[in-house]
């Protein structure tokens, strides 16, 4: 590109984007390095990176075809007016892509075949980060069914054992969470965890609320008083 010399601090990144097919510039000789990036430009890059360029071209190409595909994939910005993109819009676009399955070539013959897979989303393909949803049953200190069976700094979520966990992750024991981890050398290493608030309900019972002398109070039926009313919290048998 005539406008991207070796003195340009972004030259390597620009040519890398071209080699990967994510960006091509305004022509074969002019990239437009000093031109503002618009929402449609950003959507085009993301759709291509996710492997949906062929589908976008079938649906009309740039820019309507890409907007159509972005809408289908539920990427924010597809309905935004084409204007200079802001960092906040780009950040939301990227968040929206994290769980999108990458469209990859699965066969080459008379026609090129594409396919997607639940375990081949954006995070997995580009960053080797996997996502597990489930309940944290062991946090390296204790477990829902008794003593912890893993070491300090480890946890178990949905049957997956994860190493090098952040200390805050311990607090989510018993919670339904979204856990992100990297598999390295056969072991799973912690990246991030967040509770799924829509699937969790917390009940706090203090010691002075317990009615231990009540009929029916046992290890799976916790009888307590709340605002003068007697209530029972039932636990799973393994808790």
Image (spheres, helix red, strand yellow):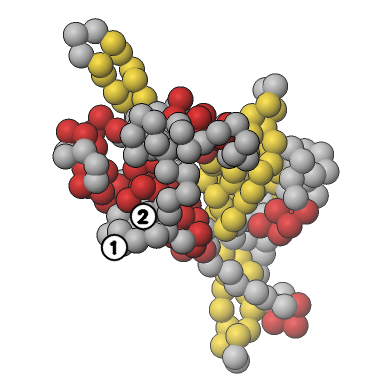
Going by the picture, which residue comes out furthest to the bottom?
Answer: 228
* Residue 78 at least partly seen: yes
Q: Nearer the viewer, residue 151 or 1?
A: 1
Q: Nearer the viewer, residue 174 or 221?
A: 174
Residue assigned mark 1: 81
- Badges 1 and 2: C-beta atoms under 8 Å apart? yes
Residue 170, x across and y down, in percent? 73, 54
- Is 188 rendered above or below residue 41? above
Q: Nearer the viewer, residue 56 or 215?
A: 56
Which element carries disc 1, helix, strand or loop?
Answer: loop
Residue 151, x across and y down, in percent? 81, 39
Q: Looking at the rendering, in which quadrant would you find the N terminus?
A: top left
Q: CA distance from mark 1 to mark 2?
A: 8 Å
- Is 46 rendered above or below residue 222? above
State the mark number for residue 39. 2
* Residue 149 at least partly seen: no
């Amino acid at each position: 590109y005539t406008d991207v010399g070796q003195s340009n601090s972004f030259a390597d990144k620009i040519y890398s984007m071209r080699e990967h097919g994510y960006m091509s510039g305004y022509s074969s000789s002019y990239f437009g390095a000093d031109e503002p990036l618009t929402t449609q430009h950003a959507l085009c890059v993301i759709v291509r990176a996710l492997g949906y360029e062929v589908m976008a071209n079938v649906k009309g190409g740039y820019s309507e075809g890409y907007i159509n595909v972005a809408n289908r994939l539920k990427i924010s910005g597809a309905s935004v007016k084409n204007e200079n993109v802001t960092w906040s819009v780009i950040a939301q676009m990227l968040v929206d892509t994290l769980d999108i399955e990458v469209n990859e070539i699965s066969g080459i013959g008379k026609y090129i075949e594409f396919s997607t897979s639940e375990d081949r989303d954006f995070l997995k393909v580009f960053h080797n980060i996997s996502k597990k949803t489930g309940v944290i049953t062991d946090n390296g200190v204790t477990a829902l069914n008794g003593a912890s069976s893993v070491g300090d700094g480890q946890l178990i979520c949905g049957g997956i054992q994860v190493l090098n966990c952040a200390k805050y992750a311990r607090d989510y024991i018993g919670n339904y969470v979204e856990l992100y981890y990297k598999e390295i050398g056969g072991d799973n290493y912690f990246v991030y965890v967040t509770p799924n608030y829509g699937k969790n309900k917390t009940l706090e019972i203090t010691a002075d609320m317990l009615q231990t002398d009540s009929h029916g109070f046992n290890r799976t039926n916790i009888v307590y008083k709340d605002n003068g009313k007697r209530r029972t919290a039932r636990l799973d048998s393994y808790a």
